[in-house]
Amino acid sequence: MINLGGIIDASTLDYPGKVAMVIFFRGCPLRCIYCHNHRLLNGEDLVEEHTLEQKIQDASPFISAIVFSGGEPFLQSEPLLRLASFAKNSGLLLGIETSGYYPDRINEFGKKGLIDTLFLDIKAPLSNTRLYELITGRKDVVRRVKASLDHALHADFDLEIRTTVFRGLVGSEEVEAIASFLSGFRGTYVIQEGVPDLAPEYGKGKLSGFSYDEIREMGVIASRYVDRVMIRTKEKGLEVV
């Protein structure tokens, strides 16, 4: 059984250059102050795995990839493993979006060839444990994310790193610190516009966003350290800096 958060049957936005089905898993060990999928943090909607396998099989002529999102997909690692194996055997590319909280599971999936692209959140500079705890509402996250990043950098799959920005929380200084830490990284670094209106109740009133021009300037700063930098904004979507 899978605790399912929802499905997007066909998306052109979630896997670079591909049409993908997106499957959302409920549950997450973090409580991020700006989480835009907070409706998936709790609750239960149990679905038989074979039901999702049938949906994947029916969609496979029309899609090229599956993206597992959440929540945190690796929280439900056993059903995720079986579903990822089914999708891979159906000839589909596999993308997984993660907070990096489960490095051993990322390592396991990578070694089994069940990740083609990992979308990894780095929510704050990994040198700033206090800020990471403020954002995620949990301790011991930085150590786990560092281990996940290390596995991903040495693995045989593509890696996209993402940072969501909010004024007074994560801005140009933090983005530069992250990009500097990633100096020489050959994957894609995406700076995402945070949307205060999508935050959970415990985050509302504490967040404010940046303008498009401010976010683009962050992208320019990051590009001093990382070759491929993109920004994702409400105004213009995803674009290369």
Image (tube, helix red, strand yellow):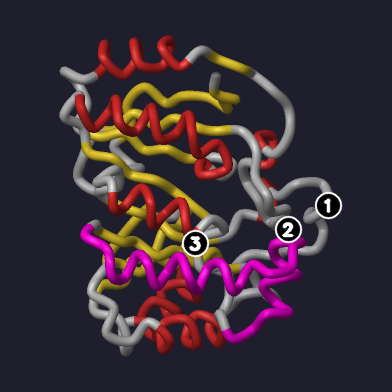
Q: Nearer the viewer, residue 218 or 145?
A: 145
Circle 1: residue type: Tyr
Element marked by disc 2: loop
Q: In the rendered structure, which disc, 2 or 1, sits on the residue that comes first in sequence?
A: 2
Q: Which circle marks residue 202 in the picture?
A: 1
**Between residues 193 and 107, which one lies in front from this camera angle?**
107
Q: Nearer the viewer, residue 104 or 134?
A: 104
**For mark 2, does the 10 Å Cα neighbourhood hold few (<14), some (14 to 19), or many (20 or more) residues?**
many
Q: Which mark is residue 121?
A: 3
Residue 169 picture quarter: bottom right
**Dot 1 surroundings within 10 Å: few (below 14), some, or many (20 or more)?**
few
Range shown magenta: 127-156
- Discs 2, 1 touching: Cβ within 8 Å: yes
Instruction: Give above or below for 117 relative to 170.
Output: above
Name the quarter where the N terminus is drawn: top right
Q: How far separated are the C-alphas under marks 2 and 1?
A: 7 Å
Q: Disc 2 versus disc 3: distance between alpha carbons?
A: 14 Å
Q: Which residue occupies 24% across, 57% down? A: 157
Q: Position of residue 147 (x, y in %)?
A: 48, 70
Q: Secondary structure at mark 3?
A: strand
